Image (cartoon, rainbow, N blue to C red):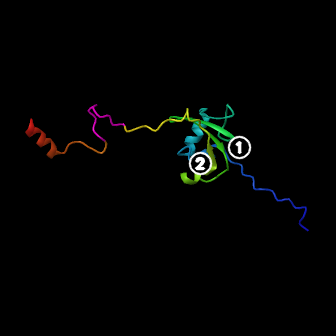
């Protein structure tokens, strides 16, 4: 009776700015839309619009202050997810040569800068320094 019935999958129409926000590439959707509008997001070497529909298998190139990132869409997601879940919706294809190395501590031993978490001298410390001098 139901042999000829074809069930279609639910097709989501998902905007690029919403997808990039949902997978935590940008902090807000407005920042995502601004980056897209300024040409910092490309698909197949072409500048795209924020309203572009995202499809599984597409590769996007994102440029930001941290560097260049290449991502491939694995699955679509409408709502923002935690980072641990969001990484399941894209593959990071960024080559090792392009990836920015993790920055080491900003503290340099002999530049006269204070170590981190070591604030200004207290009143007691300053008085003891004055007694020495």
- Name the image quarter holding residue 97: top right
Q: Is residue 1 left or right of residue 75?
A: right
Residue at 72 percent across and 51 percent down: it is 12
Depth check: 96 or 131 in front? 96
Identify residue for label 1: 57
Mark 2 or mark 1, which is nearer to you? Answer: 1
Q: Is residue 80 visible?
A: no
Depth check: 103 or 65 in front? 103
Q: Is residue 113 magenta?
A: yes
- Name the image quarter holding residue 128: top left
What is the secondary structure assignment of the residue under circle 1?
loop
The prevailing secondary structure element of the residues shown in magenta is loop
Within 10 Å of disc 1 (Cα), the crowding (few <14, some 14-19, many 20+) is few
Span shown in magenta: 106-115
Quarter of the image that includes the N terminus: bottom right
Identify residue for label 2: 23
Residue at 59 percent across and 35 percent down: it is 95
Lower position in the chain sequence, tag 2 or tag 1 = 2
What is the secondary structure assignment of the residue under circle 2?
loop
Q: Is residue 58 visible?
A: yes
Percent position of residue 54, x then y: 69, 44
Residue at 60 percent across and 44 percent down: it is 20
Percent position of residue 111, x then y: 28, 31
The residues tagged by marks 2 and 1 sit, at their Cα atoms, a distance apart of 15 Å
Contact (CB < 8 A) between labels 2 and 1? no
Asked if residue 114 is positioned above or below residue 86 in the image, the reply reads above
Q: Which residue is outermost to the front?
A: 96
Depth check: 37 or 106 in front? 106
- Name the image quarter holding residue 63: top right
Percent position of residue 13, x then y: 71, 49
Quarter of the image that includes the C terminus: top left
């Amino acid at each position: 009776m139901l042999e000829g019935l074809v069930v279609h999958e639910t097709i989501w129409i998902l905007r690029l700015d919403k997808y990039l926000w949902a997978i935590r590439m940008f902090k807000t959707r407005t920042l995502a839309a601004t980056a897209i509008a300024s040409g910092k997001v490309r698909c197949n070497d072409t500048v795209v619009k924020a309203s572009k529909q995202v499809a599984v298998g597409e590769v996007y190139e994102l440029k930001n202050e941290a560097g260049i990132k290449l991502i491939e869409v694995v699955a679509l997601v409408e709502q923002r997810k935690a980072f641990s879940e969001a990484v399941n919706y894209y593959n990071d294809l960024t080559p090792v040569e392009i990836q920015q190395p993790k920055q080491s501590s900003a503290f340099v031993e002999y530049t006269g800068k204070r170590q981190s978490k070591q604030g200004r001298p207290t009143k007691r410390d300053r008085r003891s320094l004055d007694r020495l001098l």
